[in-house]
Image: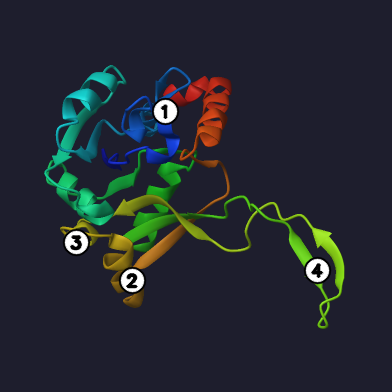
Amino acid sequence: MEAIVLAGGKAERLGDAAGGLPKSLVPVGGQPLLAWQIGRLRQVGVERVIVSCFGGQEHEFDARLAGLGVEVLCAGEPERLGRGGGIRFASRLRHETGDVLAMNGDELVDADFGALLERHRATGAAATITVAQPPSQFGQVELTDDDVVTGFHEVSRVPYWVNCGIYALSPEALERFPERGDHEATAFPALAAEGRLRAFRHTGLWLTVNTPKELRRADEYVSAHPQWLG
């Protein structure tokens, strides 16, 4: 079983905390951030992970992701291809021809990959996207029709579902990904219009790592959950 991981992030918002590394290789809990997701992939039977990175960074990814119990191959993009283009470019290194998992490599998400694939195959969808309700950054102000404030309400999660960047993709879906650009603006809307796109609801952890504060939270989390590495 194979997975494709997008790892072209530049870590610009992390600043000096990134140490000049691509975001997916920034140390978290003593391991590259991407190593934690690879550990969870290995636990569900993924034996081969294709990493979509920027050209010239392949050696660094190879060196830092060695010894994780899976075969890691790097697909170095000759130019920035966008997320959809990066997945399609990396898919050329696949050995298998069936469904494939694809995801971002700079986040911590405890989605059930096995259940995602099972749902994807049971529905016959061309692609299945994992959706989540992320924590809300704001509280709700309660108002009357004439704008009298009657109270405040803490909102733990936003009341809608968003794409958290983990997919189960059929060969048909991969063929429809753009060679350059974003699949969420091209392939996914087209599949949705045809009724070929399904969702898999995730209610657990989704921890983005874009700022030094989020990096500290991620470090605290994996330090408390070393089992993620298998």
Q: Amino acid at mark 1?
A: Asp
Per the image, the residue denoted by label 2 is 189
Find out whether the residues at labels 4 and 1 contact each other: C-beta distance under 8 Å.
no
In the image, residue 227 sits, relative to residue 189, either above or below, namely: above
Mark 4–mark 2 distance (CA, rounded to whole Å)? 35 Å
Depth check: give the residue in front, 86 or 19: 19
Q: Amino acid at mark 4?
A: Glu
Q: Position of residue 200 (x, y in %)?
A: 46, 56
Of pointers 3 and 4, the one earlier in the residue sequence = 4
Q: Residue 175's mark?
A: none
Q: Quadrant of the C terminus?
A: top left
User: Looking at the image, is mark 4 or mark 1 nearer the viewer?
Assistant: 1
User: Which corner quadrant of the image does residue 20 belong to?
Assistant: top left
Mark 1–mark 2 distance (CA, rounded to whole Å)? 38 Å
Q: Position of residue 24 (x, y in %)?
A: 35, 33
Q: Residue 16's mark?
A: 1
Circle 4 SS class: strand
For the point 20% across and 54% down, the residue is 85
Mark 3–mark 4 distance (CA, rounded to whole Å)? 44 Å
**Residue 46 visible in the snapshot:** yes
Of pointers 3 and 2, the one earlier in the residue sequence = 3
Circle 3 SS class: loop
Q: Amino acid at mark 3?
A: Pro
Depth check: give the residue in front, 57 or 132: 57
Per the image, the residue denoted by label 3 is 178
User: Looking at the image, is mark 1 or mark 2 nearer the viewer?
Assistant: 1
Q: Residue 142's mark?
A: 4
Q: Amino acid at mark 2?
A: Pro
Of pointers 4 and 2, the one earlier in the residue sequence = 4
Circle 1 SS class: helix
Depth check: give the residue in front, 18 or 227: 18
